[in-house]
Amino acid sequence: MNPNPAIRGAILYSLAVTEELAGDPVRACRFLRQSLRVRPDNNPTQAKLDALGCDDPDADR
């Protein structure tokens, strides 16, 4: 089962926050970029991505 984009994006964002709190910003950035791919105009996700300093948008493709 594949959730709709809004739900999938929210799940990926939550995983990013979990990884950030666990001390793994690289994995957090990966989940944030995945979240933005399914919800491209999500401002909170973009803000979190910018705040973490996630540099390479192609790193996890």
Image: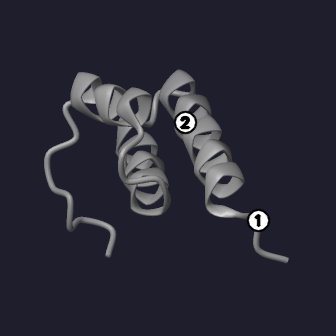
Mark 2 residue element: helix
Q: Residue at x 14, y 46 (%)?
A: 55
Marks 2 and 1, the one that precedes in the sequence: 1
Please state which amino acid type lies under the numbered disc 2. Glu
Residue 22 coordinates in the image, percent (x, y): 57, 28
Quarter of the rendering occupied by the N terminus: bottom right
Q: Spatial distance from mark 2 to mark 1, Cα to Cα? A: 21 Å
Q: Is residue 5 left or right of residue 41?
A: right
Q: Residue at x 15, y 55 (%)?
A: 56
Residue 14 coordinates in the image, percent (x, y): 63, 36
Residue 2 coordinates in the image, percent (x, y): 76, 74
| Residue indicated by mark 2 | 19
Q: Residue at x 62, y 60 (%)?
A: 5
Quarter of the rendering occupied by the C terminus: bottom left
Q: Nearer the viewer, mark 2 or mark 1?
A: 1
Q: Is residue 28 left or right of residue 47?
A: right
Q: Residue at x 47, y 27 (%)?
A: 23
As drawn, which residue projects farthest toward the front? Answer: 41
Q: Is residue 58 left or right of residue 47?
A: left
Please state which amino acid type lies under the numbered disc 1. Pro
Q: Looking at the image, how many numbered discs can be counted on the residues?
A: 2
Q: Nearer the viewer, residue 12 or 37?
A: 37
Q: Nearer the viewer, residue 49 or 60?
A: 49
Relative to 44, is 46 above or below? below
| Residue indicated by mark 1 | 3
Q: Nearer the viewer, residue 46 or 17?
A: 46
Please say if the residues under marks 2 and 1 sit with CB atoms less than 8 Å apart: no
Q: Which circle marks residue 20 in the picture?
A: none
Mark 1 residue element: loop
